[in-house]
Amino acid sequence: MDNNGASSSDFNTELKLKGFKVYAVDSNASGNNYSRKDFYKISLTSGRYIFHYAERSFETEGPILFFANPHIPYSCNIINPTREGYACLFTEDFLKLSDRSESLLQSPLFKIGGTPILSLNKQQTEAIGDIFQKMIENQDSNYTYKDELVRNYINLIVHEALKMQPSENLPKHNNAAERITSVFLELLERQFPIENPQHPLELKTAQDFAKNLSVHINYLNSSVKEVTGKPTTSHIAERVISEAKALLLHTDWNVAEIAYALGFEYPTYFNNFFKKKTGLVPKSVRAAQL
C-alpha cells in the first residue's frame, strides 16, 4: 500500500500515465528497501531517519528535504516517523518538457557525490510546505495547464534548495575539456547501480570510455586530469569501489558474484583491487555490519 491508501500497482500506473504524483506523507508509512527506484523523488519530512544512499549513510532528525535520483539506489529506515510531510514523484520526461529543467537534474542535489539531504529551519520548512500544498491542490484540479504549473513548482523547490548549496558546487562547462569530462563522468555514472550480477560492467577502463566517446585516450586523460585534478583511472576505480561497498552492504550476493558484476574475471583480482584501494578485504566490510 502507498501513502494514499491505494494499491501499489494503481499508484504506479497513475504515476506513469501522468508523469508525476504529489501526496501527503502518512505518519504510519514504512521504510523502503535498498534499491534503485523508478522515478525522481523530492520529499519534505520531519522525523528521525537513517538514509542509505549509494554507499553512504545519513542519520537525520528534524525537518529535511530529500532528493532521490532513479539511477542511484537508496533506502530509508524510519526511527521516529514524521507527523506531517509531503512527497513528489516525477519522471525525467515530465520535467524535461521544460527546456530549462535538464540542468536542474544535473545539479548536486541529484548527483551521487552531491548532497541529497538538506536540513531546513522553520521558515524554510513552511515555505517548501506551502509549495507542496499548492502542488496537491493543482494536481486535483481541472485546470487545463496544471501539468505546467506542477512542473514550475518542482523547479521552484529545486531552485530554493540550490540556494542553500554553495554556488561553487554547480557544474560549469566552459570549454572542450570540461565538456568531455562532464560526458565521461555522466557515462561512468550511467553504469550504476548494478542490479543483476549476470550483467557486468561494460566500460571498465579508460580505453573503453575513450572508444565509446570517440576520442583519443590521451585527450580524454588529459582533459579529465585538467578539470578534476585526478586521472581517469582514479575516477573509475573510486566509482567501482563505491559500488562494491554498496553491494557488500546491501545485497546478499557472494563476493564472486560481486566481482563478476564489477567486471573482474576472477574473485582474486577483485579482492586484490579492493584491498589495494581500501586497505580491507571485501568480506571484512560485510562482516562489519553484522
Image (spheres, grey):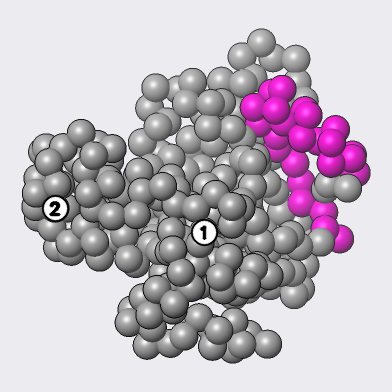
Q: Is residue 128 magenta?
A: no
**Label 2 crowd bin: few (<14), some (14–19), many (20+), radius 10 Å:** some
Label 1: state its secondary structure: helix
As drawn, is 202 to the left or to the right of 15?
left
Q: Amino acid at mark 2?
A: Asn
Q: Residue at 47% across / 43% down in the picture?
A: 158
- The label on residue 91 is none
Observer-nearest residue: 37 or 87?
37
Q: Amino acid at mark 1?
A: Ala
Is residue 73 shown above or below 187? Answer: below
Q: Residue at 35% across / 44% down in the picture?
A: 186
Is any atom of residue 133 visible in this view?
Answer: yes
- Magenta segment: 4-29
**Label 1 crowd bin: few (<14), some (14–19), many (20+), radius 10 Å:** many
Observer-nearest residue: 102 or 223?
223
Label 2: state its secondary structure: helix
Residue 29, percent from left and from top: 82, 58
Observer-nearest residue: 145 or 242?
242
As drawn, is 204 to the left or to the right of 199?
left
As drawn, is 211 to the left or to the right of 90?
left
Q: Residue at 49% across / 53% down in the picture?
A: 200
- The label on residue 221 is 2
The residue tagged 1 is: 261
Residue 203, percent from left and from top: 36, 48
Q: Whole-Å distance between the Cαs marked 2 and 1?
A: 25 Å
**Occupied quadrant, residue 147:** top right
Task: For the residues labelled 2 and 1, say whether their Cβ atoms are less than 8 Å apart.
Answer: no
Observer-nearest residue: 42 or 215?
215
